[in-house]
Image (spheres, rainbow, N blue to C red):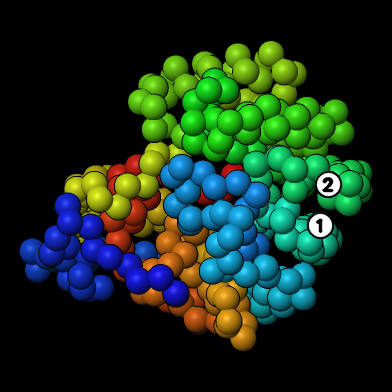
Amino acid sequence: MKDVEQPTANAGKFQNRHVTADGSQRASVALSRPETLWFNTGTLCNIECANCYILSSPTNDALVYITADEVSGYLDQIEARGWPVREIGFTGGEPFMNPQMIEMAGACLSRGYEVLILTNAMRPMMRKTMRAGLQDLCTRYGDKLTLRISVDHFRSELHDEERGAGSFEKTLEGMRWLRDNGVRMAVAGRTVWGDSDADSRAGYAAFYQAHGFDIDARDPGQTVLFPEMDETAEVPEITTACWGILNKSPEDVMCASSRMVVKRKGAPSPTVLACTLLPYAPEFELGDTLQEAERDVHLNHPHCAKFCVLGGASCSA
């Protein structure tokens, strides 16, 4: 497990789980409406992006491949705990690097869950076995399956700036195949270039129209625009008083509605994390079972403030 270094810009902050630097009571979030359970399929990826928050690459196996049997075990726990889960999400790394990706998605779909897979739609997804599996799942479950494609920017040169030369065209090839085979798509983009929300959505709308992609650029669930998660940026700590000041509810924060399961290299079994964005922060590891993961989450990290409370972002559809 990686050590988490305290960013210089936030020196003195985010040190105590219960109290902020000025002695105020730190805000916490209860798991009030568990709607999404995420599985990290492993940190291995076919490419290495410039600003990957989880440091995925062709060599990073800090999080190893989770198995279909392990996923099914957590689906059993959802039912045993009575969690009202609507959606199962898969993220990586690149999920289609995991040889059991189709089997895992099928296990979730067969139990009635919606399934969301985050992918770059490149070569791992385009392997013959994966394409055949996706065609079968689409035939059996239709729009219960969604692939959210990483298109960092609608302009090829900016997308390739993040993901490497030629990446945009390879992703576009995968998206065309998904379109032609009726697989439901969404898109995840980035706001690092400073475009306004309106300009970004107009650009994606033109991109979708040009290629015949049935994706709504105005719907934040279909076109998700993520801010960069810079841990060195100065951010305020969130206290219990902030809910009233910001006119925001703890239920609006991502950890009120989701958890993520990962399997660390060398670990005998998977573990449950509070958040998809903090895979290497030990404080946000809640235990091996969903029952253990039902406890409150204290917002003791810059991402909690900048990305979730102030940014209002969510990884779910």
Name the residue: 61% across, 55% down.
Answer: 58
Q: Residue furthest bottom?
A: 268
Q: Which picture quadrant has residue 193?
A: top left
Residue wearing tag 2:
127
Residue 252 seen in the figure: yes
Q: Which picture quadrant has residue 304?
A: bottom left
Left or right of residue 173, residue 30 in this image: left
Residue 299 is labelled as none
Residue wearing tag 1:
102
Q: Please, is residue 278 above or below residue 18 in the view?
A: above
Name the residue: 63% across, 30% down.
Answer: 166
Name the residue: 37% across, 47% down.
Answer: 229
**Nearest the eye: 294 or 274:** 274
Residue 262 seen in the figure: no
Image x and y of residue 231, in percent: 30, 52
**Nearest the eye: 159 or 15:** 159
Q: Residue furthest left?
A: 22
Image x and y of residue 100, in percent: 79, 63
Q: Please, is residue 50 above or below residue 251 in the view?
A: above
For the residues labelled 2 and 1, the Cα–Cα distance comes to: 12 Å
User: Which secondary structure, mark 2?
Assistant: loop
